[in-house]
Image: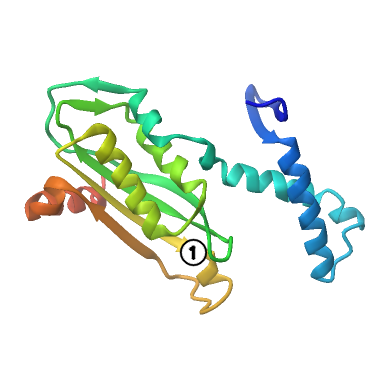
Amino acid sequence: MSDKDVLKGESRDGYVKIDRYNEDKIEAVATHYKDILGQLGENPEREGLLKTPERVAKALQYLTHGYDLKPDEILKGAMFEEDYSQMVVVKDIEVYSMCEHHMLPFFGKAHIAYIPNGHIVGLSKIPRVVDAFARRLQVQERLTNEIRDCIQNTLNPMGVAVVMECRHLCMSMRGVQKQNSVTTTSAFTGTFLSNDKTRAEFLRLITASLD
């Protein structure tokens, strides 16, 4: 963390929320957003908007903090040798990202599986890898591939499967304005790519209910 990075904590019911932001970046982005508000026909000096440029700048820095993370290092920090070669599935991982075309959110769920080849990884690390890539300006197709490739290249499993289902506000709020549309993307490697039965088992597991 540089000298310009600031940590602020806020305690609520025993929970401490920590925000990290770079003061120089916040100031620069906020200045532009103040100009943007004026260009939109608003008065950036009115009470309700006085702190809006700074708030937006902080929000954007948080929503894109994935640029500062190294997803492969997240996985390497919790890799363990283990003699297990059956499918490991982590499903219903919440995804929140920003479309790089309109800078509007898209959100949904990711379902991820891998078949170990001598190494397993701490289960919490897989959602963290999803976040590390999602907290950047993205398109869903690339996000799906980046998650797949990171797990494959770092763990070297016998196969990786990723399916993402997301709603895009750039489709719901503007353009075609289709509020109920869902975009599904998938990416596979290894056994999931070459073996129809393995891929079918993964798809069955991510749609199955525990009830």
Q: Nearer the viewer, residue 29 or 188?
A: 29
State the SS at label 1. strand
**Horizontally, is 185 left or right of 120 in the view?**
right
Task: Tell me what residue is drawn at x 16 percent, y 38 percent.
Answer: 87
Q: Is residue 91 above or below residue 106?
A: above
Q: Is residue 5 above or below residue 14?
A: below
Q: Position of residue 176 (x, y in %)?
A: 51, 79
Residue at the disc numbered 1 = 168
Q: Is residue 22 above or below residue 191?
A: above
Q: Nearer the viewer, residue 170 or 147?
A: 147
Residue 211 visible somewhere in the drawing = no
Q: Quadrant of residue 126?
A: top left
Residue 140 visible somewhere in the drawing = yes
Question: Quadrant location of the N terminus?
Answer: top right
**Horizontally, is 176 left or right of 83 in the view?**
right
- Within 10 angstroms of label 1, few (less than 14), some, or many (20 or more) residues? many
So how many labels did they put on this image? Answer: 1
Task: Tell me what residue is drawn at x 14 percent, y 31 percent.
Answer: 117
| Figure colour scheme | rainbow
Kind of residue at disc 1 = His
Q: Position of residue 178 (x, y in %)?
A: 49, 75
Q: Quadrant of residue 73?
A: top left
Q: Position of residue 202 (x, y in %)?
A: 18, 49
**Horizontally, is 181 left or right of 22 in the view?**
left
Q: Position of residue 166 (x, y in %)?
A: 42, 59
